[in-house]
Image (tube, rainbow, N blue to C red):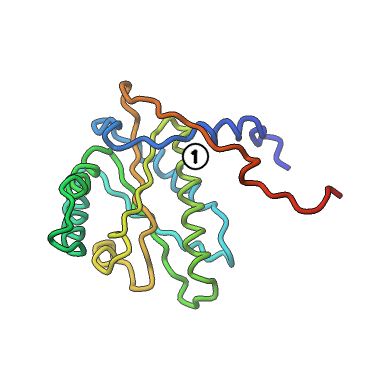
Amino acid sequence: MDADLPSLAHTSALIRARRTVKPADMDAARTLPRELLETLLENGTWAPNHGMTEPWRFDIFEGDARQNLADQLQAIYREITPEGEIQAEKLEKFGSNPRLAPTIVACSMVRTPSAKVPEREEIEAVACALQNIQLSATAAGLGAFWSSPPLLETTAMNRFLGLRPDDVCVGLLYLGYPRASAAEPPRNRRPLAEKAHWHGAPA
């Protein structure tokens, strides 16, 4: 075992320090260094994946490309939502959130051509990559917001990202430095005893 690895206590502290920071609470004017972003994404690629398929793809939106993303999200939402069911607040957020965060990463599952691994496992691998990125962002002092609206799982979104029919965008990860005025959301979890069911006795 590598002696330079962080202790369990430090790892636990990092995991429990992760929090969701909405784009409205990010400093859009403070861009993220390319080297930092590459480190976050590289850490994402070290997520576990069955058969070493490495099914992730990252599309990074910065600068003017954020407006293009916002326009596409609004257009797709209008396209898939019956006219009488369009929610003005939701439509507005699809347009504003990409402009409020300095960086947005569309994290997609790219299906292995041989389909040797179940699709569910490929999606789960991308979710693990997303968590790696979020924990790395926390360690770097960044805030992150993982958004996965239904419109991501559409032909229109695949077309926008250049994905194939069998691929799917698993989530949009908004990244940015939290504003100094951003409120610290409460963090708590229900007791482990409510979730853990032990079977058998220790060896």
Residue at 37 percent of width and 53 percent of height: 171
Provide residue 39's location: percent of width, then percent of height: 45, 42
Q: Position of residue 8 (x, y in %)?
A: 66, 34
- Residue 150 vertical position relative to residue 173 in the rendered view, above or below: below
Say which residue appears at 32% left-offset and 37% top-offset: 22
Residue 150 drawn at (x, y percent): 31, 59
Q: Left or right of 121: which side holds 173?
A: left
Identify which residue is drawn at 47% across, 57% down: 126
- Which residue is depicted at the point 73% across and 49% down? 198
Looking at the rendered structure, the secondary structure element under dot 1 is helix
In depth, the one of 48 and 200 nearer the eye is 200
Quarter of the image for residue 6 reads top right
Residue 88 in percent (x, y) is at 15, 48
Whether 69 is drawn above or below 31: the answer is: below
On-image quarter of the N terminus: top right
Q: Quadrant of residue 170?
A: bottom left
List the residue tagged with mark 1.
135
Which of the 4 image quadrants contains residue 38?
Answer: top left
168 vs 55, left or right, is left
Residue ranking furthest to the left: 83
Q: Is residue 119 above or below residue 23?
A: below
What is the three-letter code of the residue carrying label 1? Leu
| Up/down of 39 relative to 187, above or below | below
Looking at the picture, tell me which residue is in the foreground, 192 or 47. 192
